[in-house]
Every structure is written in structure tokens, then in C-alpha cells.
Amino acid sequence: MNLKKPKFWDLKKPNYLAYLLLPLTILIKINIFITNLYPKKKFNKIKSICVGNIYLGGTGKTPTTLKLYQLLKDKNYNIVNGKKYYSNQQDEYLLLKNKSQVISSKNRKEIMKQALKKNYKLIIFDDGLQDKTIDYNLKFVCFDSKNLIGNGFLIPAGPLREEINSLRKYDCVIFKNIDKNVDLNEIISKIKNINPKIQIFHTYVKIKNIEKFKKSDQYLIFSGIGNSKSFKEILIKNDFNIIEEKIFTDHYNYKDKDILRITEIAEKKNMRIITTEKDYIKVPNYLRKKIDFVDIELEISEEDKLIKFIESIINEKS
């Protein structure tokens, strides 16, 4: 079951409800403590990168994974993506499958073993920073530049899987930006105080198929992703005339009646329908003809610097 993220998670300061739930975060802290006790396995014959987050959902993990995959593929690395199987997260797996080579299994050790059997030399995991079994060569943490760490509390009092101080054990932070003018100096300073050696990069969202859409049209948008607000902001920034919006829970499994209802509303008000690519692949084939999706790609600032940083680690001798 996928639950809708509470709005109080993203308040700049915790409210009374967050403080009321704060004692329950001890369960997360205990789990983190136990996880850190497990010896993690390093696979010497294949290098690994993990693209994850400490903020729950909507940080751009999958687009970042695909972008890194393409950059390193272009550099002729024998590379594959890895995605742990979750029955309620097949949208992310399908998106990876459509745009890259990907291996999926119910545990990440098995994914590594399959990658080795197929003679891959480099694997990028979409999610898995909190996995207690694998010692990755490189660990990336993604943040949305608007939400950042929310109210700063752990689940269920806030949106964090781990406290911000956990960044001391990671290698790189990637901020997903929509607005290039957003001021991140305060959070960057905080991160650097926690881990002076951590690398920080910025990505910017680009709509690849923007020519498909007319600014004069009116649009109904719908999404069931970790950060639906971010999806809407991307469209507004690109001058889409949004009349109506339907928001579903993250990884929502669309039923025919959901889509039929959306198309009915759009037809009555003469609106075109847009969704995300991740949502589009879950729409039944026979209903897709009335729906478009925006093809999102990330652009990385200081791309060459990022590639050199990655190569300095993955090309090290084990």
C-alpha cells in the first residue's frame, strides 16, 4: 500500500504533529544502528555505484541513474543498471528497462552475481543506500532543491530515512533543480561541515519533447510520483497552461476507471492530458492514445568534472 506523503513533512520547521511523532523515530534509529553492524560485501570484479536518497521519494534517483548510465556508456564502459524488485515499484523498473540494460532481483547481492555472470564491469543501482549487504564503490545521495531535508526529522515525524549527519559516509550529493536561481548556500555549507570531502553537483530538468506541445492548449495533468509538485513546476516553468491537476499516491497502480475518468473530464473541458513517463507506462495500452507524457532528461552542471570524479574511483585498483 502506498501512502500519500504528509504535508507537514516539508515544513521548514517541525510542527506539533512532528514532535508528537518524534518518539517513534527511535525505531528508525535502532534499525540504522543494527544495519551499520552488518559486514558489507565488496565485489572486487565489478565496480558499483549506488544512486539513492535519505529523503523519502521525489529526489530524481531514476533520472540521475539513467543520466549517469548514458554518460558512462558513451565512455565505453561495460555497464548495467540494477534495481531491486518491489512489486509496487514496477514503474521505475520499466522506465529503466526502456532506456538501459537493467538487472532486477529480490536482493541486490543476487543482482551483483547476475551482473558478474554476464561479464559487466560496472553497475549502477537505482536506490539501495540503506542496503545492509553491499559495500558500493561510490555512493550518491539525491536531493530535490525545493524540499531538501523537509522538516529535518526521521520517518514518521519527517521525510528522512537517515539523519542529515549520515552524509559523512557518502561520496557525492546531487541536487535536482528546476529553478537555477534557488539559493542552496545554507544547505551546502551544512553538508560541507558534516563531510568536507563530499562532492556536490547540480542537475537541471529539461523537457526533450517540448516541441510536441502547444502553449495555446489547455492541459489536465496527472501523476502518481514521489514529488508531484515538482512535475507541475517543470510544466509551469515551460509555460504550459495547466487548468486541472489530479494527484495520486507514489507508484500508484492505475485502474481503467481512473484513466477513463480523467479522459472524460478532459474531453468535457477540451483539455489535452499530460503525465510523466513513469506514469504513462502504467496506463493500459488501449487508453494511451488520448494521453501524452513529457520526456524528462537531466542536464548536469560541471559534467566533465563529475565524470572525472567517478572515473577516479571506479578505475582504482581493488
Image: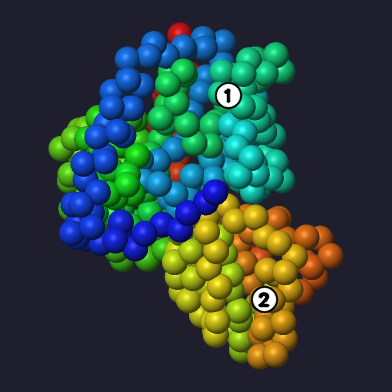
Q: In the visual, does 62 lie left or right of 9?
A: right
Query: Residue 273: percent from the left, percent from the top?
Result: 66, 76
User: Which residue is disc 1 drawn over?
Assistant: 107
Q: Quadrant of residue 196?
A: top left
Up-down relation of residue 71 to residue 266 (above or below):
above
* Label 1 crowd bin: few (<14), some (14–19), many (20+), radius 10 Å: some
The residue located at (30%, 56%) in the rendering is: 9
Identify the residue at the far right of this view.
286
Q: In the visual, does 75 lie left or right of 58?
A: right
The residue located at (56%, 60%) in the rendering is: 224
The residue located at (67%, 76%) in the rendering is: 262
Query: Residue 209: percent from the left, percent from the top?
Result: 65, 66
User: Depth check: 95 or 183 in front?
Assistant: 95
Query: Residue 232: percent from the left, percent from the top?
Result: 49, 70
Q: Earlier in the sequence, mark 1 or mark 2?
A: 1
User: Which residue is disc 2 drawn over?
Assistant: 262
- In the picture, the quarter occupied by the C terminus is top left
Q: Quadrant of residue 102?
A: top right
The answer to whether residue 119 of the structure is visible from this angle is: no
| Amino acid type at mark 2 | Ile
> Considering the numbered disc 1 on the image, is that residue within a helix, a strand or a loop?
loop
User: Depth check: 102 or 6 in front?
Assistant: 6
User: Depth check: 200 or 84 in front?
Assistant: 84
Up-down relation of residue 25 to residue 282 (above or below):
above
> Considering the numbered disc 2 on the image, is that residue within a helix, a strand or a loop?
helix
Instruction: Measure the C-alpha gap from mark 1 to mark 2.
Output: 37 Å
